Amino acid sequence: MALSELRWDAPADRSFRCVTIGGAVLAMLGAAAAKYGKSIPVFAADRATVEQAVLAWCPDGVTIDRAAGERYLGLFTNHYVWVDSGVGTILIGSSVALGALLLKLTGSGDEGPWLRTPRHRWHFLVLGLAVIAWTWWMTMFSLQIDLRRRVFPICADSIVIPMFELTVLTLILTPVLIVAGFALTRFFGPLPAALTVWDGSRPTRSCIVSVVFVALMAAVGAVLALCIPTSMTWASPALIVALYLIAATRAALLHRSDVTLPKIAASRARHG
């Protein structure tokens, strides 16, 4: 579907309108929050006091004084919290709106609801790799941001160490996750499937699968909530994609070959 063919006033597209408009509103609220944060000073103390507190954190240049560190960190205002929360909200709203638009534009009249799974199994693996890559990249970026913000003791180990360790961990986990994801796709039904699909003929199976994946979505949502007010807020788009991927996997596992989406069934009936 071309962008010019979108009918924003179509009754069937009400959910699509709500999601895209909601995402846009969320992005605007995020911009307002970030702007407000910019108006707040970083520290609730003068520069000399802040510098003294930084030095007191490492009194002899080697040992870290945790009590002094708490006093120093207590000098920070909510400047970064508001800025990071604003940026994260912008990214979440934009990701939701753009994701909905992409699903709508790449759909066809015979594929049923616009809110659906990817068309092919390999799409799931590509999205999963994108989530891992973006999260790793933003973790590296987050460490650099926090270093510039001086939230680490000046005598602490270099951020190169956690960057190296996280990179090694990512390289170890990625093949494992790819293999696990590929194995899971072997149990998928026909694609695409509506994200709201439910196998009424096997309610127990549907319930168990749904509970497991809803729990996974809740865990990812909790991580997203924790990331938003921090420098890890830049990982928000990856976590939004992860939420979609989990919901899509649930739907793909429950979609049976003898269950067709309404518009597909109607199309087949028209064509005999």
Image (cartoon, rainbow, N blue to C red):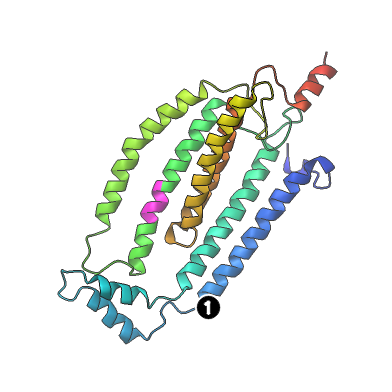
At x 36%, y 53%, the residue is 140
Residue farthest to the top? 272
Task: Provide the secondary structure element on which disc 1 rests.
Answer: loop
Q: Residue at x 51, y 55 (%)?
A: 225
Q: Residue 209, how many percent across, how many down?
A: 56, 30
- Per the image, the residue denoted by label 1 is 39
Residue under the image location 40 percent in, 49 percent down: 137
- Please identify the quarter of the rendering in which residue 7 is found: top right
- Looking at the image, residue 201 lies above or below residue 113: above
Q: Is residue 165 visible?
A: yes
Between residue 219 and residue 145, name the one nearer to us.
219
**Quarter of image, res 188:** top right
In the rendered image of this protein, does residue 56 appear above or below residue 266?
A: below
Task: Classify mark 1: residues with Cα within 10 Å, few (<14), some (14-19) or many (20+).
Answer: few
Tag count: 1
Residue 245 shown in magenta: no
Q: Nearer the viewer, residue 204 or 17?
A: 204
Residue 56 in the image, given as x and y percentages of width and height: 23, 78
For the record, the magenta segment spans 136-141
Query: Is residue 254 in view from this perspective?
Result: no
* Left or right of residue 203, residue 216 in this image: left
Q: Characterize the magenta stretch by its predominant secondary structure.
A: helix
